[in-house]
Amino acid sequence: MRVGIDITPLARPRAGVGNYCYYLLRHLAALAPKSQFLGLATGLASIEPSDLPRSMVYRQVRVPTRLMHRLWSIAHAPRADALLNGLDVYHATNYFLPPTKSAHRVLTIHDMAFLARPDLCSPKITRSFAKYVPRFLEQADAIIACSESTKADILHYSNAEPAKVTVAYEAAGEDFTRMDRETAAERVTKAFGIEGPYLLFVSTLEPRKNVPSLLRAFVQLAKDIPHRLVLVGGLGWNTAPIFETLDKLQLGGRVTRVGFVESYSDLSALYSAADAFVFPTLYEGFGLPLIEAMTCGCPVVTSNNSCVPEVTGDAAVRVDAEDVAGLAAAIRRVLEDEHLRQSLSARGIEQARKFSWERCARITLDVYSSLTGNH
């Protein structure tokens, strides 16, 4: 079986979809050594060969990705399978489904926020995705959703056939590991200058992550607890309300912004040393930071919407994301109840074990096989 895979998201710095490609490729290659996996990348940023399995051949079309998408949309050429000298399956890993001559097409959807919560997304993304993705969902031969919640959104916001949609859960990076708290705290101090107890938030700073509500909840607690709030993540779309809230609440001395952290070892330390991971998201397709926190045994306080209950099971305290007082009360409860913290930590580790990249790859391989008849 010859399978082409969009590896464009592997361009550095590798973020969410890039990590999906990275781990999926490694496990596909290990599980199906007799199949050929070929990469196709567009854009001007280089792909690091070290990010690919040793056996993988790839081709990079050095045309800006947006321009390539326009070519595919308007001219329906060049065909993706022709660029890779013929394929049985082409797997579009990042929403855009290119034309093929004869290859079956698989499309992965990581979330449907652009239709489910367009108010939380960049208008540029919303306009483009809302126009094309529902059409791609109808055209794809098979669809992979990262959660049952995302599958439900796919079926609600498109005319995709239910039988075409398969759920393949993602997972934490395999270098994530729980660290001894004292060792983790020392590493956090050395790497980031953070001392003393802290609450942790990890994700891109953007509207759907609901950071202003987190800040308002934290200010309700700040006088009663010694903790600082550590925000980890790069800047996304429309960050102004976050910084306006930060200035208004005069929390500058109690909030530390670290920025994007690429090292899994440093992230593992940040999760492992935190007293709680607080993630009041308004919408998630999968919620990878939740899995990361649970993997590291960090007690989780989060919201009760979209895929969050599905992913966290009984291993988190969940509240209405827009109930600031309820969020503050939940954080306080976790900080004051040592038994609850220990229970959440243990249950989180167990819950995180349910998600693995090997399982994701096996399900994905089954999807390919169902299209080609190669079992």
Image (cartoon, rainbow, N blue to C red):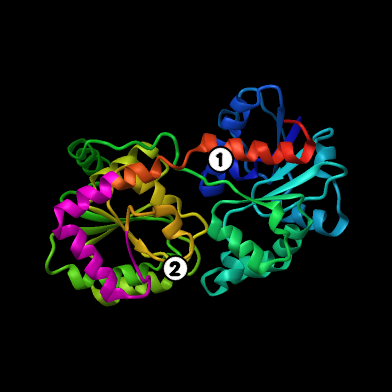
Q: Residue 117 placed where, x, y %? A: 55, 71
Q: Residue at x 69, y 66 (%)?
A: 128
Q: Secondary structure at mark 1?
A: helix
Q: What span is in magenta?
A: 317-346
- Residue matched to label 1: 360
Q: Identify the mark nearer the N-term, 2 or 1.
A: 2
Q: Secondary structure at mark 2?
A: loop
State whether residue 135 is above or below residue 345.
Answer: below
Q: Residue at x 77, y 39 (%)?
A: 89
Q: Is residue 253 visible?
A: no
- Residue matched to label 2: 282
Amino acid found under the numbered disc labelled 1? Cys
Q: Residue at x 53, y 34 (%)?
A: 358
Amino acid found under the numbered disc labelled 2? Leu
Q: Is residue 125 left or right of residue 133?
A: left
**Where on the picture, by quarter, is residue 51?**
top right
